[in-house]
Image (tube, helix red, strand yellow):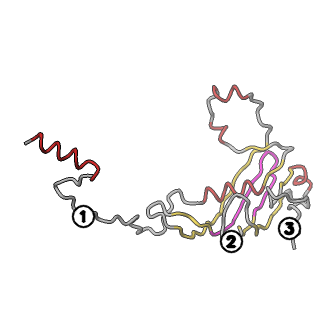
């Protein structure tokens, strides 16, 4: 049984990262260069009714990591149509390639002038760095939450009450009654 106070590689776990970090140097020391982490924990920034359950498999393939995850949890969402809360099962079955290369040195002034290339949209970590499993799993589960949240496909939305038909004469505030009387006298 896994010690809950230790990360997958036996390091102490912090509150910010209950699954821990996987250092690339230690992953390379494992004979198969592969690690499977069983998950049964709540994630700090993801409010779920049940703990996130599943497994994450990390395979070091030289210049990149292949990360495969299957996980599930139940979250409470708010319907976009009727604003009612409902429970939704989030299921994750994903694979991601994370490149191992040093990040480019960019000063902050370049960010306002820099044009993004398609390569900038690829996830990268340093070959000497580590993979934060909690953050990675949190991001994947957030992407698995449906963008349009509906409690039911046939949800009609918020029920609107019909207002009684207004009379042809607008109702006058009693504080303006004297002014209305004066207006009526002047028009006659």
Q: Position of residue 141 (x, y in %)?
A: 65, 59
Pointer 2 residue: 50
Pointer 1 residue: 164
Residue 119's label in the rendered image is none
Q: Position of residue 136 (x, y in %)?
A: 72, 54
Residue depicted at 44% across the width and 61% down the height: 81
User: In this orientation, which residue lies closer to the viewer: 15 or 149?
Assistant: 15
**Residue 159, quarter of picture:** bottom left
For the residue labelled by badge 1, is the local secondary structure a helix, a strand or a loop? Answer: loop
Q: Measured along the vertical axis of the image, is residue 13 above or below residue 85?
A: above
For discs 3 and 1, the disc positioned in front in the rendered view? 1
For discs 1 and 2, the disc positioned in front in the rendered view? 1
For the residue labelled by badge 3, is the local secondary structure a helix, a strand or a loop? Answer: loop
User: In this orientation, which residue lies closer to the viewer: 113 or 128?
Assistant: 113
Report the Cα–Cα distance between label 1 and label 2.
Answer: 47 Å
Query: Which quarter shows the N terminus?
Result: bottom right
Q: Position of residue 95 (x, y in %)?
A: 68, 57
Residue depicted at 68% across the width and 71% down the height: 50
The residues colored magenta run 56-74
**Mark 3 crowdedness (10 Å alpha carbons): few <14, some 14-19, many ≥20:** some
Question: Of the residues under marks 3 and 1, which one precedes in the sequence?
Answer: 3
Question: Of the residues under marks 2 and 3, which one precedes in the sequence?
Answer: 3
Q: Measured along the vertical axis of the image, is residue 20 above or below residue 113?
A: below
Question: Of the residues under marks 1 and 2, which one precedes in the sequence?
Answer: 2
Pointer 3 residue: 4
Residue 17 falls left or right of residue 95? right
User: In this orientation, which residue lies closer to the viewer: 81 or 21?
Assistant: 81
* Magenta stretch prevailing secondary structure: strand
């Amino acid at each position: 049984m896994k010690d809950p106070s230790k990360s997958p590689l036996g390091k102490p776990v912090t509150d910010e990262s209950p699954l821990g970090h996987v250092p690339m140097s230690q992953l390379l020391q494992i004979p198969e260069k592969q690690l499977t982490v069983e998950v049964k924990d709540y994630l700090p920034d993801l409010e779920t009714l049940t703990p996130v359950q599943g497994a994450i498999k990390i395979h070091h393939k030289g210049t990149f990591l292949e990360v495969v995850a299957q996980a599930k949890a139940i979250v409470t969402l708010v319907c976009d149509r009727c604003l009612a809360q409902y429970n939704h099962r989030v299921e994750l079955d994903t694979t991601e390639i994370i490149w191992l290369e040093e990040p480019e040195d960019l000063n902050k002034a370049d960010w306002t002038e820099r044009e993004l290339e398609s390569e900038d949209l690829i996830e990268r970590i340093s070959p000497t760095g580590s993979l934060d499993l909690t953050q990675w799993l949190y991001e994947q589960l957030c992407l698995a939450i449906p963008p349009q949240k509906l409690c039911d496909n046939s949800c009609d939305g918020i029920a609107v009450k019909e207002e009684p038909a207004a009379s042809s004469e607008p109702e006058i505030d009693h504080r303006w009654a004297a002014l209305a009387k004066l207006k009526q006298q002047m028009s006659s």
